[in-house]
Image (cartoon, grey):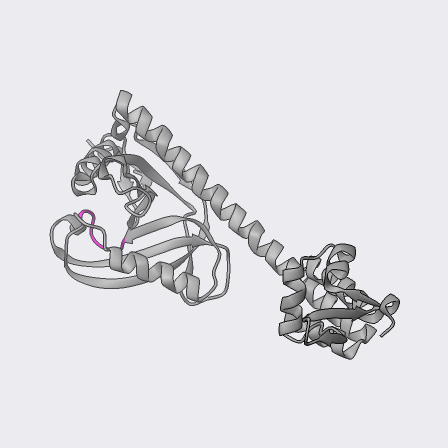
Amino acid sequence: MNRKDYYSIGEVASMCNISIRTLRYYDEIGLVVPEIRKEDSKYRYYSDSQMLNVIIIRKLRTLGIGLKSIKKIIEQNDLDIITENVSRRVDELRKEIEELEWTCKRVDATLDRLRLGMDIYKKNAVSRVSEDIKIEKIPKISIYYSRKIMQSYHNEKVSMERWVGLEDEIAENELRVCGPIIVTYHTELLDQFFSKTCDIEFGVHIETCDSENVRTFGGFDAVTVYHVGSYSDIIKTYVKAIQWINQNNYRVNGSVSEEFIVSPIDVNDEKEHITKIIIPVEKETTKKA
């Protein structure tokens, strides 16, 4: 062996700026096997060609290409193979960027919702927000929903099982969530409080998509009010909203909904739970005597 034509593992590590431990691992998996190995001293010696392979591997690793793919590239030593793998990596990165952008949007939306909840909670400490009843135009959104008839329903406790089940369906169908849970009661006003049979819909604001379980929500005028605190006494806020409707010459014109600004799956302390009540209304054509 002409020593000048070969490099020890230490020399390769130093010249290629790679650890000896990594080189030994590459040897173990058959990625870069030293051309000469002295069994008596356990010395490893690499050729010029193998030195170049180590540099190629190092470069491909910085691009995020996996060792399994790199091994094929080194074995086949073909420009088409390298181009194909780099192209595939670009596609992977673009998809990751797209997913990260959507994750960022969802995190931003969650942050906005929690900040809104914090502002409402602080305001409620000064003056009761249940008195801040107003008319609001509810914008149109797409929601993924699950609708079910529930016997002897009483809403003192939100159905966490259906809540979790809905989120699992959304994840399974790879849908992109844009907002919070919205529960809609397709039943007579206030029936959900009196252990009656209720037609209840759990929905989540998502990006528009084609699905039999996606529908449009909103696009109507509604009386809205925030309820802060335990969900068990939300009926009191409903009563105030209904009184406001009657006193201001409106009438209920659709199914009522609840949008969970700060929910039990955000904060465990029920004192900090915030629910937005949404009651579709229209103006009475003639004023009541």
Tell whether position 197 is magenta.
no
Q: Compared with residue 46, is residue 258 higher up or lower down, i.e. above or below?
A: above
Residue placed most toward the observer, 25 or 101: 25
Residue at 65% across / 67% down in the picture?
24
In the rendered image, which quarter is residue 275 located in? top left
Left or right relative to 69: residue 270: left
Left or right relative to 183: residue 10: right
Q: Compared with residue 163, is residue 286 higher up or lower down, i.e. above or below?
A: above
Q: x, y (%) of residue 222? A: 35, 40
Q: x, y (%) of residue 54? A: 75, 65
In the rendered image, which quarter is residue 145 located in? bottom left
- Quadrant (top left, top right, bottom left, bottom right) of the N terminus: bottom right
In the rendered image, which quarter is residue 125 located in? top left
Residue at 16% across / 39% down in the picture?
233
Q: Residue 241: in sight, yes or no?
A: yes
Residue placed most toward the observer, 9 or 233: 9
Residue placed most toward the observer, 259 or 40: 40
Judged from this view, the residue extending furthest toward the bottom is 76
Q: x, y (%) of residue 105? A: 52, 46
Question: What's the magenta region?
Answer: 185-190
Dominant secondary structure (helix, strand or loop) of the stretch shown in magenta: loop
Q: Compared with residue 92, is residue 39 higher up or lower down, i.e. above or below?
A: below
Residue at 88% across / 66% down in the picture?
4
Q: x, y (%) of residue 127? A: 27, 22
